């Protein structure tokens, strides 16, 4: 589970980070007046033109590291609690949600600094663009690419910690941990449910294609291989759709401008409830879903690939003898997702 989770974290982060950038920009609405009304695709195009291709991966370092760790922990803890405490079953079993949620306090400790640095880096160029717009003439603005004050995630972390102490990295810790618990619980609950449904559907299609009258209900390689990314993608999209308002509030809390030094301004932070109240008053309930389209698209892409990488890594471990799982099928006797090791 640890090897599979680590592989899932790397693959998922690299594939989904550009869409995560677009989501953050749309959530916080800190872009210039020229980009406020752009769609997700148009905004991504604008970012590439005005900030350069390297900007879409600005701030990828912290999530690449932390999400690899968190995925390792989440898959491992889910397997452990599901097998030893909650005894979750395949299909729509709420015990799978409880098993997933058990690791959320640990996940929050890891992901809160990562989310803060990622959000600050993703909005850094925007703030640089706004400051540039105040100093330059309109005809000069398009001639220069936007650059922020932070050269790297490490520089951002070092600057903030030196000015405000380590505690600044845990801005928004409570709302982020609550979001983690809600997300990962929904994630694993839906994955096991969708996987069971897709297996049945694909197995039925497989039987119709081959005109099979066999009553054998075991998965075929075809149904197994397709069920995993489909279930993973749908689970990720569902989990993000249900928890997106909390992520929007989290982004608002962690995306607030933080002075790089005590001399540049007084640090004034709004809490999660204040951000929520402001969003509802200024944008209404729909404001809590700003940026939801790129987020769900990213979730389907990332989660599908993440579970495929996870299950594929487990299969390789079984084949190489690193685990005790059965090897009779392409991913073990019970197929991918069988937490029997």
Image: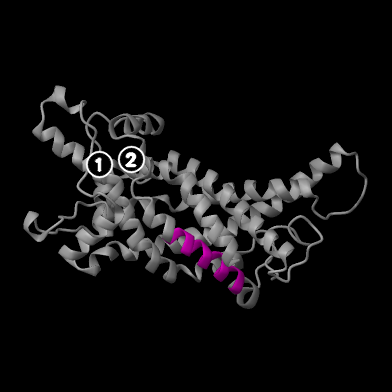
Q: Residue at x 45, y 68 (%)?
A: 104
- Residue 38 percent coordinates (x, y): 33, 30
Q: Quadrant of residue 324?
A: bottom right
Q: Residue at x 22, y 52 (%)?
A: 256
CA distance separating discs 1 and 2: 8 Å
Residue 180 in the magenta stretch? The answer is no
Q: Which residues lie in the magenta part? A: 66-80
Q: Nearer the viewer, residue 232 or 60?
A: 60
Q: Nearer the viewer, residue 119 or 270?
A: 119
- Residue 173 percent coordinates (x, y): 32, 65
- Which residue is situated farthest in the left direction here? 263
Q: Quadrant of residue 25?
A: top left
Residue at the disc numbered 2? 55
Q: Are marks 1 and 2 in contact (CB under 8 Å)?
A: yes
Q: Residue at x 6, y 58 (%)?
A: 263
Q: Secondary structure at mark 2?
A: helix
Q: Residue at x 74, y 62 (%)?
A: 319
Q: Quadrant of residue 28?
A: top left
Residue at the disc numbered 1? 125
Query: Can residue 244 be seen by looking at this rendering?
Result: yes
- Residue 311 percent coordinates (x, y): 65, 57
């Amino acid at each position: 589970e640890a090897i599979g989770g680590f592989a899932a974290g790397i693959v998922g982060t690299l594939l989904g980070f550009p869409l995560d950038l677009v989501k953050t920009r749309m959530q916080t609405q800190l872009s210039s007046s020229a980009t406020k009304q752009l769609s997700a695709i148009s905004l991504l195009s604008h970012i590439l033109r005005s900030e350069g291709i390297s900007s879409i991966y600005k701030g990828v370092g912290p999530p690449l590291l932390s999400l690899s760790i968190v995925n390792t922990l989440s898959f491992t803890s889910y397997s452990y609690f599901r097998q030893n405490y909650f005894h979750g079953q395949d299909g729509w079993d709420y015990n799978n949600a409880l098993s997933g949620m058990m690791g959320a306090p640990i996940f929050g400790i890891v992901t809160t600094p990562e989310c803060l640095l990622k959000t600050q880096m993703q909005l850094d160029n925007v703030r640089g663009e706004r400051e540039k717009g105040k100093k330059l003439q309109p005809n000069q603005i398009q001639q220069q690419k936007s650059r922020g004050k932070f050269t790297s995630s490490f520089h951002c972390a070092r600057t903030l910690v030196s000015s405000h102490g380590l505690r600044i990295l845990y801005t928004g810790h409570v709302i982020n941990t609550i979001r983690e618990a809600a997300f990962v619980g929904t994630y694993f609950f839906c994955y096991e449910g969708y996987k069971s449904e897709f297996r049945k559907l694909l197995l039925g299609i497989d039987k119709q294609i081959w005109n099979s009258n066999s009553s054998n209900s075991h998965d075929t390689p075809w149904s197994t291989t397709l069920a995993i990314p489909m279930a993973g993608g749908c689970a990720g999209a569902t989990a993000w759709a249900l928890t997106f308002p909390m992520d929007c509030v989290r982004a608002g809390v962690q995306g607030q401008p933080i002075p790089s030094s005590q001399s540049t301004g007084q640090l004034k932070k709004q809490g999660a409830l204040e951000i929520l109240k402001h969003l509802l008053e200024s944008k209404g309930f729909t404001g809590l879903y700003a940026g939801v389209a790129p987020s769900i698209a990213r979730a389907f892409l990332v989660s599908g690939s993440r579970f495929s990488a996870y299950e594929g890594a487990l299969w390789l471990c079984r084949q190489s003898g690193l685990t005790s799982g059965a090897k009779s099928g392409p991913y073990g006797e019970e197929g991918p997702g069988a937490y029997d090791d």
